[in-house]
Amino acid sequence: MTPFPFSAIVGQDEMKQAMILTAIDGSIGGVLVFGDRGTGKSTAVRALAALLPPIKAIKGCPVNSEKAALVPDWAGLTTKRGHTRPTPVVDLPLGATEDRVTGALDIEKALTKGEKAFQPGLLAQANRGYLYIDEVNLLEDHIVDLLLDVAQSGENVVEREGLSIRHPARFVLVGSGNPEEGELRPQLLDRFGLSVEVTSPKDIDTRVEVVKRRDAFENDNAAFMLRWQAEDAAIRDRILTARKTLGKLKTPEKTMRDVAELCLALGSDGLRGELTLLKAARAYAAWRNDTALTRAHVRSVAPMALRHRLRRDPLDEAGSGTRVARTVEEILG
């Protein structure tokens, strides 16, 4: 069955906005979605990927290379014809072995043909697409370490069993989980560009609308997809326009000073907060088709860019989102 239409997802506006911003600028660093189960987290990432235009890739290339010259030798492709394919969305399940994630020696070829060949893993499949991790806070530490390395370099390096393989691994990381089931290591938390919180709808009308749309999607899929086709196309066109606008957007010095002052006031560690906030604000301005970055753009995206970067304050019972909103009000007005 086709993915649920992105535009048909009821509510969860901050989550949808965060995912759209990462589609405009993949260097923002992905999205962490924390909240209740069954609130559309995995549906949203699949829906967004399905909405985006197909990517051009060499047919059969295990890392989705755009050009024949970029196909790795170990892929062993005999023909390098191009084709288009949907934006990849790869699930990284809990309990996945390191070999499954990074790739490893192809045992079947080794045993049957005596050849030492590389069997690519999930990181290869996710290149130029999305890597989705449900319950990311329960991920084993050695897999977290591995992801940190790859997220930093954009390259997967496999050095074992006599193999020495490198391949590009650039993807938008989307993680979801329930904070009551475990905390995320600070190092991985910091790697996510944006963080949003989702909750189950609290009013009857919204809950009924969610159920009605899901029911229509499952019982008359063709008609439902046709119903939302135009809305999804409008979002896709805005994303593509925003990507072009991004390079022409003006970033005034005073807005950069706003960003720095805000991060300083919140005690954000390092400078990753500033860089991410600036990129997110620029993507948001491009999404609105504005020509220059303003304080209003920064104000709009500051909670999702900064709430997961705050140190805990045992004397402040307010959530991190509230602390960011309060400081934004004090600094930016």
Image (cartoon, rainbow, N blue to C red):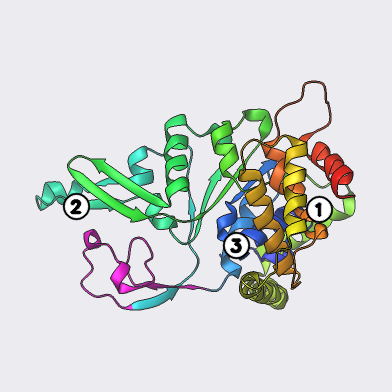
Question: Label 1 belongs to which residue?
Answer: 299
Which numbered disc, 1 or 2, marks the residue that appears first in the sequence?
2
Q: Kindly report which numbered mark, 2 or 3, lies closer to the viewer in this rendering.
A: 3
Circle 3: residue type: Asp
Q: Quadrant of the N terminus?
A: bottom right
At 23% across and 68% down in the image, what residue appears? Answer: 77
Query: What separation in Å lies between label 1 and label 2 (alpha carbons)?
Result: 51 Å
Query: What separation in Å lies between label 1 and label 3 (alpha carbons)?
Result: 18 Å
Local SS, label 1: helix
Q: Is residue 325 above or below residue 72?
A: above
Residue closest to the far top: 314
Question: Label 3 belongs to which residue?
Answer: 25
Q: Is residue 117 left or right of residue 150?
A: left
Circle 2: residue type: Ala
The residue lying toward the viewer, choosing from 177 and 310, is 310
Question: Label 2 belongs to which residue?
Answer: 117
